[in-house]
Amino acid sequence: MLVQDIVFWILSLMAIVGSLGVVLVSNLFRAALLLILVFVAVAGMFILLSAEFLAVVQILIYVGAIAILIIFAVMLTRDVQRGNLPNRMHIPAAVFAALLFTALVAVAVDTKWDFLPAEHQERVELVQVSAVTIITDEVLNDEGLSLQEQEEIQESGLADLLISDYVLPFEAVSVLLLAALIGALVLVRPDRGTGRG
Amino acid sequence: MNCVLGSDNILNDTVLYRVIYEAVGNVLPCGLSYVVAGLAMMMILVNGVLVGAGLFSWVERRLIGRFHNRIGPNRWGPFGLLQPMADLVKLLTKEDLTPKSADRLLFAIVPVAMLAPVILTMAVVPFAKDTALANLNVGVLYILAVTSITSVAIFMAGWASDNRYAMFGASRGVAVLISYEVPVVMSLLGVVLLAGSMSLDDVVSAQNVPFLLVQPMAFFVFLAGISAELNRTPFDLAEAESELIAGFHTEYSGVKFALIQAAEFGAVLTSSAVIVTLFLSGWSGPFSEYFGWAWFLLKIGVLAFMFSWVRATLPRLRIDQLLAFAWKFLLPLSIINLFATALEVYFLRDDAGTLATSDLWVMAGINFGVAFACLIIFGTLIKEKVRPARLITGDTLSAVEAD
């Protein structure tokens, strides 16, 4: 446990210092790179929770795609050489950030963070594995689980959960992505009256 | 034999690690030998990639020499074999310049950030039976995730250098990396579907028939995508010498340049290793119980030779051709391949969800037909689509003026 504690503290420090840096560093490009550091630290947290799949996807999507898009956006920003200029939006932004922070703290306090009992550990690991590999019946039989438990595991793979129990958040995220897509198109379209677009 | 790994320890699957661990355990206490064996494995990995990169630089220069009908480096050592060492000494003794207006910290991080993904990739590749440093059950995704860090490094190089050529090279390079990531990922999904697992060990053991035969189109798309991501001719726009000096690493010299070069040559080897594992049945072959590593190296050698061959033969593409090739040619091909593979797996698998060897041969037959048809159809389509002159014909110009 000791090693895991040390790693946890290092990762937490990385994430906290990194996020503070994202907000406080005036060089926008460096801020974007610090954001990548935060993403990597969060991926490390996922590995610590033995959720390798989520960790790898975190790196693939956030570092490989989102961070790159942010950097592209930074470079297309005017006055990027003069750094992070203040603007009129800082009061609404502060209010929104405070609300978000309160919500996160409330959820964190409310959640029961107890360790899983040992007999559930195997099942949780199998659910993790089922995200990336087909679990054959023999493997399930070897684990000595009852038929009902076997069915539960086979039905609780990540993909199945996404389109059954968590279908509403899943759809909400897709609508969000669609909105972002349309927003980007609106931003880059030529001015009205050109007869195009 | 004082120290024995617990049976639930995942490192137990790695034979090489277990052997080193037990050997060191005879001398040192168990906790320490756990660390020492881990460090030894990392040593093998890092040095394997770096020495391989050095050797490959010599092989490639000799090969390209032959392709150009000249000799290539042949002075230092037998057949010029020690040339990489001479190059290294030269680069290490050169002045290590940093431009005055550069972002010093980022400028210094770049070479490491370029080299790290290359070495990290090799960690999950099994080079003989049970020898992958880490047999992750998300191996295929891990490779994609780790290699995606390269685009950040290229961006950092362009930005930190504060040089326009470097910035141009970096934006080109990242545009290429982002575009080719999509078909590469899509083509890998076919392999994952066939193997039923993302672990590279499982992918190798599932290849009773090499996936090169079962997934010819995925292989082609993956190969093209990977050579674009490797920044090599004909896709070397990010460092096109005749246009951008040296692209994103224009300002790099001395040790840093050596590291970037090592990363580029090493990347060819690790990509070959990944292709061998995914499509050419990895270390398996006759007598692979004992000579798996030899098969693995041989297959890597064949692929690396092919990469050099392509580099010496084909001229560079323009950036619009390059992006059109990714989005209009490779992406549709990979989507068709994924769809065809999914249908075939759905209809051919048995109740347990596994595929028999005969089914693989059936799929190979169908997929070869599909591949030829698609290559011909999309080949003719793209030939008409990419016509550069159209952009500056009078038609378009007058439309712009009307605005």
Image (cartoon, helix red, strand yellow):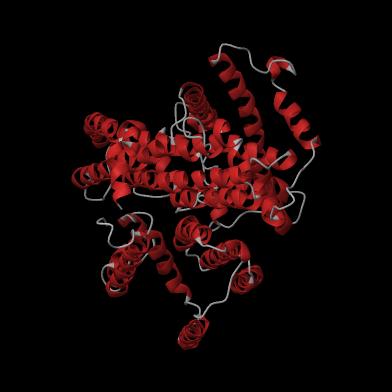
> Going by the image, does B177 lie left or right of A141?
right
In the rendered image, is residue B277 in sight? no
In the rendered image, is residue B382 in sight? yes
Residue at horizontal 32%, vertical 30%? B213
**Image location (x, y in percent) of residue B292:** 51, 32
**Image location (x, y in percent) of residue B96:** 77, 42
In the rendered image, which quarter is residue B58 located in?
Answer: top right
In the rendered image, which quarter is residue B6 located in?
Answer: bottom right
Q: Quick one: quadrant of the N terminus of chain A?
A: bottom right
Q: Quick one: quadrant of the C terminus of chain A?
A: bottom left
**Image location (x, y in percent) of residue B20:** 67, 45
**Image location (x, y in percent) of residue B145:** 48, 53
Q: Is residue B358 above or below residue B349?
A: above
Residue at horizontal 55%, vertical 15%? B68
Q: Is residue A106 above or below residue B103?
A: below
> Going by the image, does A196 lie left or right of B27?
left
In the rendered image, which quarter is residue B374 located in?
Answer: top left
Q: Is residue A1 above or below residue B271?
A: below
Q: How many marks?
A: 0
Q: Is residue B381 above or below residue A178?
A: above
Residue at horizontal 21%, vertical 50%? B351
